[in-house]
Image: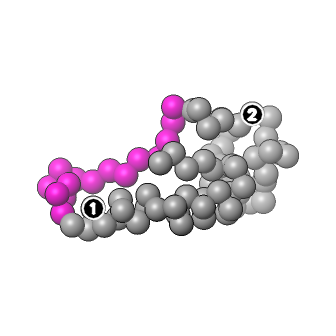
Amino acid sequence: MINTNYALTIGLSTFEDAYFAEGAESPYANLIVVRTDDVEKQWVSDLLDVLRTEEVRQFIIDKYEGAVVPTF
């Protein structure tokens, strides 16, 4: 069992090579985590604003063709 990001780097396809793949309803997601001291800093807000754009959502969809699912 390997994460999708590793499978993709060696040319494996989630849909063609996997015996099992988590669906979009999976409770597991990557999270943005910062130190408590940084929570209110502008760079954190800026980062979240950029990562949550439609452009980033579309990039994930186009680049990973369903193997990675945007959750925002």
Closer to the camera in the image, 56 or 29: 56
| Residue 20 disc label | 2
Which amino acid, mark 1?
Answer: Ser
Q: Is residue 57 magenta?
A: no
Q: How is colour applied across the structure in the image? A: one colour
Q: Quadrant of the N terminus?
A: top right
Q: Farthest residue toward the front?
A: 54
Residue 6 placement (x, y as % from top left): 65, 54
Residue 33 placement (x, y as % from top left): 32, 50
- As measured in the structure, the alpha-carbon distance from the residue carrying label 1 to the one carrying label 2 is 36 Å
Write the residue at 40% across / 66% down: 50
Residue 34, picture quadrant: bottom left
Q: Farthest residue toward the right?
A: 16
Q: What crowding class fits label 2: few (fewer than 14 Cα within 10 Å), some (14-19), or many (20 or more)?
A: few
Q: Secondary structure at mark 2?
A: loop
Closer to the camera in the image, 71 or 27: 71
Reply above or below: 44 against 69: below
Write the residue at 79% across / 51% down: 13
Residue 31 placement (x, y as % from top left): 41, 47
| Residue 23 disc label | none
Q: Is residue 40 magenta?
A: yes
Mark count: 2
Which amino acid, mark 2?
Answer: Phe
The tag earlier along the polypeptide, 1 or 2, is: 2
Reply above or below: 28 against 12: above
Residue at mark 1: 45
Residue 35 placement (x, y as % from top left): 22, 53
Q: Secondary structure at mark 1?
A: helix
State if disc 2 and disc 1 touch (CB < 8 Å).
no
Q: What crowding class fits label 1: few (fewer than 14 Cα within 10 Å), some (14-19), or many (20 or more)?
A: few
Q: Which residues are magenta?
A: 27-41
